[in-house]
Amino acid sequence: MLDYIDKIKDISKRLLKDCSVDMVIGFRKGTLPMMNEPCFAGKPEDVDQFVWDSNCGINLANYLTNRKEKIGIVAKGCDTRNIVTHIVENKISREQLVIIGVPCKGMIDKYKITTMFADEIQDVTEKGEKVLVTADGKKTTLNKSEVLQKNCVVCTHPNPVIHDELVAEKVEEQQGVDRYADVREIEAMTSQDKWDYFESLLSPCIRCYACRNACPLCYCPTCFVDESKPQWVGKGQDPTDVRTFHFLRAFHCAGRCTDCGACERACPVGINMRVFTKKLEKDCFEQYGWEAGMSLDERPPLDTYRPDDPDDFIK
Amino acid sequence: MNLMEHMGIESDRIHFSWISSAESTKFVKVVREVTEKVKALGPQQHFKKIDAKVA
């Protein structure tokens, strides 16, 4: 995957030189290991900062909302699905975009790696399927397949669904993956156990809203948690308010979430809030055969009506 | 509704019904059913704020 970068730079420079875009959004190296950050290149020379490795988990579709200029964007499979969602929801037009598609081989889970070492991680580099971590005063080699982000392990759409340029051959898509094993595990619990499970899941939440800010779907001008007239939800760390926030945010993502993992990745306390969104993703898939962001021509299930829509819950 | 149930609210507490203004008997029937089911469960223990936390 590291060899993509030359192609990404070539394409980005070409687009900027011939003025077909005003800027290209990609990644540059962050100040900490495993924390690549978004980079907005407006001039061809800015492109030299671009990097590509397994730490580009941030969903760049997040930076497209309501933009007016022409934008080139480096996009993985999940990013392109969120770009499609953005276009379908009229947050940007297809004509404004030049999508530089990146067939993705999975991003690495920085929490998993951080918890494997006692000391601070000094450096993380990649070589093929191996990840070399410098920490605790020594170098350790890990298999990338063992430290993938949880959503990448069950990803079935690593290839861009729409693209204008493609930086490499498409990668093989996993077949027959059990995407919802974790959701079923919770579904099998009793009500009380479910309640307790989410209670302990959310107990470390500090309401920093990093998950919301990292999410490309969360683009409301004023989020319901920031409203004060009326105040929909308390602003403190009362467990009821914390749960209301996560629960309602998940509902706002129903039929739109692509399980890109940006929320979980952004969380400073390591909460896997994907267990909320994934339940809705599963329901959408099972009841409407819907996977978000796969096509520009299909309307999402929440704004269409079909006579055969499931309605068993209405008595 | 599925997500409510998924995070631990008992499914018998959540009811959806479509009742026309002309269907008074259905309305009565549904309200009876709902109250019976909720009474059987007893008072809700979760998802209620006892007191607002004051610093």
Image (spheres, helix red, strand yellow):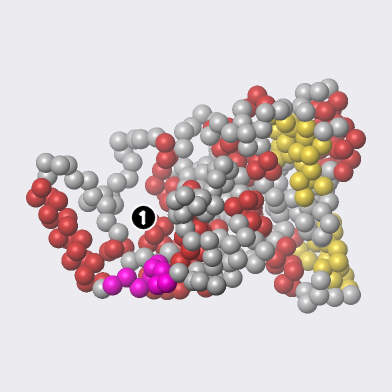
Image coordinates of residue B8 in percent, x first then y, are 40, 67
Q: Is residue A40 visible?
A: yes
Residue lying at 57% horizontally and 42% vertically, measured from the top left:
A221
Image coordinates of residue A43 in percent, x first then y, are 86, 32
Q: Which residues are magenta?
A: B43-51
Q: Amino acid at mark 1?
A: Met
Residue lying at 56% horizontally and 60% vertically, measured from the top left:
A273
Q: Residues within 10 Å of mark 1 (few under 14, many from 20)?
A: few
Image coordinates of residue A315 in percent, x first then y, are 22, 51
Residue extending farthest to the bottom is A118
Residue lying at 43% horizontally and 39% vertically, measured from the top left:
A301
Image coordinates of residue A165 in percent, x first then y, are 74, 31
- Asked if residue A241 is among those painted magenta in the image, a careful observer would answer no
Q: Secondary structure at mark 1?
A: loop
Residue extending farthest to the left is B25
Q: Is residue A261 visible?
A: no
On the picture, is B3 further left or further right than A74?
A: left
Identify the residue under disc 1: B1
Q: Please state which of residues A291 and B4 is positioned toward the viewer in this rendering.
A: B4
Q: Does residue B19 lie above or below A267 as drawn? A: above
**Mark 1 belongs to which subunit?**
B
Q: Main secondary structure of the magenta part?
A: loop
Quadrant position of residue A158: top right
Q: Please state which of residues A107 and A115 is positioned toward the viewer in this rendering.
A: A115
Quadrant position of residue A153: bottom right
Q: Does residue B48 lie above or below A71 as drawn? A: below
- Asked if residue B48 is among those painted magenta in the image, a careful observer would answer yes
Q: Does residue A205 lie above or below A223 as drawn? A: below
On the picture, is A66 further left or further right than B15?
A: right
Residue lying at 37% horizontally and 62% vertically, measured from the top left:
B5
On the picture, is A252 further left or further right than A68?
A: left
